[in-house]
Amino acid sequence: MFAPGPPQMSEAEIKAGEQEATQTIKTVVTGSVLLYLSPFAIDFVRKLF
């Protein structure tokens, strides 16, 4: 009636998942900062020319 749960993850799989999550968070934060700063960069470049 009830299926058994998923198999337990190995220590290496947990570590790989944590590294992937950390990299994803860093990528999102970097992208967010770049998107926030892009209008200022565009205005700066327009003032140069």
Image (cartoon, grey):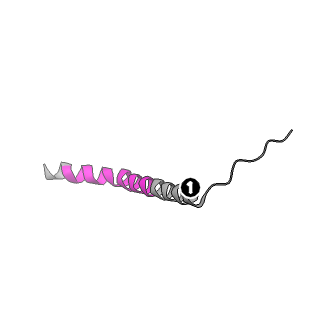
Say above or below: 15 vs 49: below
Q: Residue at x 53, y 59 (%)?
A: 18
Say above or below: 18 vs 35: below
Q: Residue at x 78, y 45 (%)?
A: 4
Say above or below: 2 vs 35: above
Instruction: Name the residue carrying label 1.
Output: 13
Residue 46 image position (x, y, % from top left): 19, 48
Magenta residue span: 26-45
Queried whether the magenta region covers residue 12, the answer comes back as no
Nearest the eye: 29 or 12: 12
Q: How many callouts does the rendering have?
A: 1
Is residue 2 toward the left or the right of residue 28 in the image?
right
Determine the residue located farthest toward the left in the rendered image: 49
Q: Quadrant of residue 12?
A: bottom right
Residue 45 image position (x, y, % from top left): 19, 51
Residue 33 image position (x, y, % from top left): 38, 56
Q: Residue at x 35, y 53 (%)?
A: 34
